[in-house]
Image (cartoon, rainbow, N blue to C red):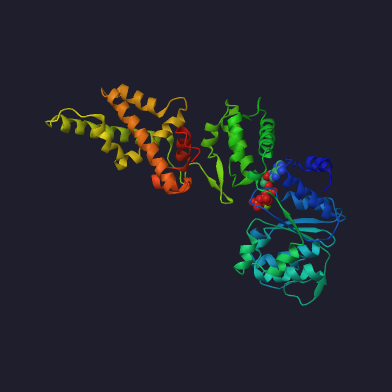
Amino acid sequence: MMDVKELQPIKQRYGIVGNCEALNHALDTALQVAKTDLSVLITGESGVGKEIIPRLIHDNSLRRMRKYFAINCGSIPEGTIDSELFGHEKGAFTGAIGEHEGYFGAADGGTLFLDEVGELPLSTQARLLRVLENGEYIRVGSSEVRKTNVRVVAATNVNIQAAIRDGKFREDLYYRLNTIPIKMPPLRERGEDIILLFKMFAMEIAKKYQMPQYITLSPDAEEIMKRYKWPGNIRQLKNVTEQMSILLRDTRVITPEILSDYEIWPTIEEKGGLVRVGRPDADSHSYQAEREMLFQMINALHREVNDLKQQLSSMPQGPMSPTTVMPISTAPSVVSVAPASTVVSVNPSASSHATLHDHHADNTPYAEEYVEESLSIEEQEKRLIIRALEKNRGRRKKAAEELHISERTLYRKIKEYGLDEM
Ligand SMILES: Nc1ncnc2c1ncn2[C@@H]1O[C@H](COP(=O)(O)OP(=O)(O)OP(=O)(O)O)[C@@H](O)[C@H]1O
Ligand SMILES: [Mg+2]
């Protein structure tokens, strides 16, 4: 590998931000193979920056004075793709008024970037394999074999191994394309680069719209950005940064609360894959709705307690003691009281206890009794969480499912109750 410093001018020229090893390795490989005619296959998730590589290869190759075409194989209809790539003769099919050269003819001496190569139909794959092997191709509707000298760089974000297994992609073509593999790392594996990219996008957008100040991240928010899954990778980071820059107007320091409004929350590693600790995907309800639901539940609980009190006081034994109320807190409704914590997350300075207390102090004469009850709910909740974690051998996802709470809530409660060591 070349000196990392040598990559700096390249990064500058192409607007590439980042210093992580995997990115440097990808760029370095691209530069090394640029001067050869070897086929390159770029893989990586959507939005990781695959399109930078073929341009970089072409510009640094001996072909740089010749033509470069970028073709998105996924966006050309199956019916015309052969003719687009390999050309057609006059009258080859209905509507083929004139002849058409096709990209492989037009790019003779140059470079073709075949983006989303995994989308090519099998018949086109056969033609592609042939032209890669000996430079030969035949126009649609012709029998004449033509020659071309094209360097092919391909990219895919689909799992091509799976496509091969499913019979949708030719294995021989895969090996032919994959002479030099270049893997673009997902954003979540780029560490500090995430913050660098955020800064770059924030500054770019501020400049573009002449904002007096660009947005920055609080230290907590930085941590969350680094631990988020980024399924849409750099494209998503760019979009989110632009949205926050524009929509938040006066807010210039991004906090974890703001990030969660943009559905960005930490993820954890579990069995090789990333699992989100956050709210469930189908998170359509707002904090307001959760809060209302919570208050309704509290009211219902309150009525239950009152009813019980009345029943007890009409019994000969006399007034209830705290222990006799216990069965209520083990009733199923208690488990669903869990969203109570959401209130806490809205207002991090208040404990759930204080929130409950305040609410009832305002509205009912039972504030004091209720506080006692809520404490026992907390105890119960803690016990239920411990039990669920033990039962599921520490697997938080499963435990959360069983408790009917989101992983995000469970994660926070584990912290709240100091159960982190479990
Ligand atoms: N290292 C980087 N520095 C700065 N910008 C980047 C970097 N990597 C990617 N980008 C930007 O991120 C966006 C997405 O990149 P690109 O279009 O290359 O993704 P892709 O891998 O081709 O995704 P897809 O598979 O969905 O087509 C582009 O705007 C690109 O300029
Ligand atoms: Mg792309």
Q: Is 318 or 103 nearer to us in this picture? A: 318
> Disc count in the image?
0
> Residue 405 occupies which quadrant of the picture?
top left
Q: Say left or right for 412 vs 63.
A: left
Q: Say left or right for 300 vs 69.
A: left
User: Can the viewer see residue 331?
Assistant: yes
| Horizontal and vertical percent position of residue 371 | 32, 26
Q: Residue at x 60, y 47 (%)?
A: 232
| Horizontal and vertical percent position of residue 344 | 43, 30
Q: Is 147 or 9 nearer to us in this picture? A: 9
Q: Residue at x 45, y 27 (%)?
A: 347
Q: Residue at x 74, y 42 (%)?
A: 16
Q: Is 411 or 156 nearer to us in this picture? A: 411
| Horizontal and vertical percent position of residue 139 | 75, 71
For residue 393, above or below residue 341:
below
User: Can the viewer see residue 97?
Assistant: no
For residue 151, above or below residue 323:
below
| Horizontal and vertical percent position of residue 253 | 60, 27
Q: Is 160 or 314 nearer to us in this picture? A: 314
> Residue 386 occupies which quadrant of the picture?
top left
Q: Residue furthest left?
A: 316
